[in-house]
Amino acid sequence: MIETLNQISSSWFNTMVLFELQNSIFIGLILMILFFLKRGPASLKKSLILIVLFKTIIPPSFDLFNINITSQTFFLPLAAGNFRNAENVSSLIPDISENLITFQSWLFGFWIFGMFVLALIIVKNQLKLRLMLHSGKPIYCNHEVTNSKIRFFISKQISNPFVIGLTRPKVLLPGNWEQLEPALQKSIVLHEVNHIKANDLFWNYLKLLSLILHFFNPLNWLLVFLCDLYMEMACDDLTLKNSELTPKHYIKNILTVAESMAANDYCATTLNFSRTFKILRHRISYQLKKEEEKMRNFKMLNKILPFLLVVLIIPFSWQCQNSDKPSIQEPVNTSAQDADFEIINNLYPFYMADEKPVMLHKERPVYPDEARRNGVSGLVVITVTIDEKGNVIEAVPLKEIKVKDESGAIVRVQKVNRHFELEPAAVQAALKCKFKPAKIQGKPIKVKMNIPFRFRLR
């Protein structure tokens, strides 16, 4: 059970580190672009933020560069350019350690727990709003901007208008709705309807999904704040465009609603008229600047920049190849004379095969109790013979390495640092490993290769 958890956590950690790195760089890039678009329209800024938001839920999934960062190729000393020593290249076997929960497993548990708590809070808020909706009184808004699909309710439990529901949107209005001026009512209705028309409800749920997945990343919280801000700003622009109000009059309406807020009843699962006071301040500042100084159009950027960012999602979502297959350094330019010299009793060095042996089952050695008590750890290399069926028919500890020159002559013999207490366990594990047999011209052959087992105390 613990071993399985550690394996899952290790895979999760490798993916998550790359995922967060890609997201952080992408968010940083957008923040730089937004800095140079200070005077740009809110609709453009909103589009950029929504593209980044979409990127944060795409894990590394594009294998662009065929890079392997989680597997390793094991080398025993190999002379540069000398492929006679390629027999010392081995396939990777996972580290063998005590049956303890790793640090990565603790991080994985924290991530699962954090997601669960945040999701629970969101569901609780959603249920609370549903109860408010059921206790609300349905009303009819006689405005030309509405349509029959949008339903309105009045609830005395809120002081700030809300939009909830994805497929069947509903607007929840405050209890003092009937006392508000008609112009203010129209501003509120226009604002909420524009949220629905702009599909902000969908993006709001996507934002929550992103927040749940990356709750530990401060940049993601900043992204959520900017998403809320620019959705409201863009909605304010649409409301002003479809009404006779000036920015100053519209700001006055926003402040009127904000002043009636007895408490901050902002909920992350909804879209509302005045949002939090921090967002409100930015919205007011934006509308005042629009009226006082001419905002730039950025007509070309409105089309080109979002397209470029969508294209950038692909390179920012590349994955490194993560394979359980052994990583083998393949030799080149091995001459026929070399092959005749190396082949003994039809036993080939694995690197001479057209199709290299592929490990199908990796047996994990049992850490010897005595070695654990004595604190013995380290690398054990086992030389195995793999038959034509892919079975290991012989396994012996590697004792020495013969380093050869280009002509095939042995230039030195290097002793291997052995761990005698660990070798029997490594030999037993090697004998239980299973391979896809090596082949030459489509015919299975018997090969010889080295397999390393690393024993590590934790």
Image (cartoon, helix red, strand yellow):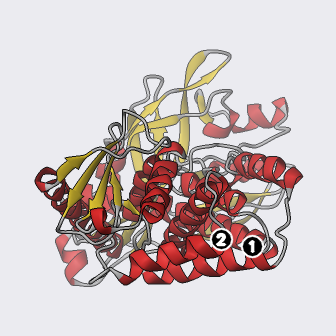
The residue type indicated by label 1 comes to Lys
The residue type indicated by label 2 comes to Pro
Residue 343, relative to residue 14: is it above or below?
above
Return the residue nearer the eye: 27 or 368.
27
Residue 166, relative to residue 336: is it above or below?
below
* Residue drawn where x is 32% and y is 38% of the image: 168
* Residue drawn where x is 49% and y is 83% of the image: 278
Return the residue nearer the eye: 278 or 81.
278
Return the residue nearer the eye: 414 or 264.
264
Residue 121 sits in quarter? bottom left
Residue position for label 2: 247
Residue 191 visible? yes
Residue 389 sits in quarter? top left
Q: Is residue 272 left or right of residue 366?
A: right
Return the residue nearer the eye: 378 or 41.
41
Quarter occupied by the C terminus? bottom left
- Real-space Cα distance between discs 1 and 2? 8 Å
Residue 34 sits in quarter? bottom right
Residue position for label 1: 290
Say whether disc 1 or disc 2 marks the residue closer to the N-terminus.
Answer: 2
Secondary element under disc 1, as helix, strand or loop, is helix
Q: Position of residue 220 (x, y in %)?
A: 51, 70
Q: Position of residue 146 (x, y in %)?
A: 44, 41
